[in-house]
Amino acid sequence: GAVVSQHPSRVICKSGTSVKIECRSLDFQATTMFWYRQFPKQSLMLMATSNEGSKATYEQGVEKDKFLINHASLTLSTLTVTSAHPEDSSFYICSATPPSKETQYFGPGTRLLVL
Amino acid sequence: AQSVSQHNHHVILSEAASLELGCNYSYGGTVNLFWYVQYPGQHLQLLLKYFSGDPLVKGIKGFEAEFIKSKFSFNLRKPSVQWSDTAEYFCAVSLDPSGTYKYIFGTGTRLKVLA
């Protein structure tokens, strides 16, 4: 149980385009989802916390207009990287928590390359 | 600011050697503590967690961790490692368990086990 999927697993796009990444909890309802960014050989950096039906809470230094997060249902959250630039190239990971909220379950990540 | 430190960035061991990975956090309040493992090319998987009670926690695959409140530490141990334990290990701390359940991750420790 507690499986989280992400789609796509890899995406290459041109600079200036927008990219949408989906995060789904497959076998539980996720009241809260988190979005992280992981740089090569570094730890996970929390970008934002997403609660179903409400606006996401962004961490300091993360541009909310750049990284749009929508949590429209209890099993789906999306991250849209708008007007992507090469510096946005990274590994993006989502996690989801069931209603008990105590433990996060992680998706496999999405590798974004912006040319 | 709250932080999580993993002092060992790279560890190389031979099979059957004992493992101990350090994790220290800086936060004076109530915390939930986690160890996650990321095998090459895979997503983060929960090894074990501590919320309360017995400070010695046993997890999957023979791993255990001990919470020492006075030292703000949550070190991960395994008596005898296997080649298949080669992975990256992340310590995470959830502050204010009654709140948002956000994690702060340590920088990770890359473990390589030589056959």
Image: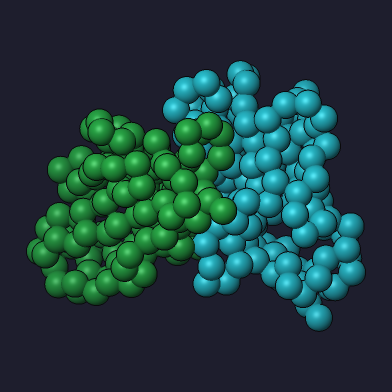
Chain colours: A green, B cyan
Q: How far across and down, in percent of the image, does residue A84 sit? A: 17, 60
Examine the image and state in which quarter residue B74 appears: top right
- Tell me: A28 left or right of B19: left
In this view, B30 is above or below A87 = above
- Tell me: B99 left or right of B16: left
In this view, A88 is above or below A72 = below
In this view, B27 is above or below B57 = above
Between B15 and A27, the one lying in front of the other is A27
Q: How far across and down, in percent of the image, does residue B7 sit? A: 68, 48
Q: Is residue A109 visible?
A: yes
- Tell me: A67 left or right of B68: left
Between A100 and B51, the one lying in front of the other is A100
Residue at horizontal 36 percent and vertical 69 percent from the top: A9
Q: How far across and down, in percent of the image, does residue B39 sit? A: 61, 67
Between A87 and B32, the one lying in front of the other is B32
Residue at horizontal 25 percent and vertical 33 percent from the top: A53
The C terminus of chain A: image quadrant: bottom left
- Tell me: A41 left or right of A32: right
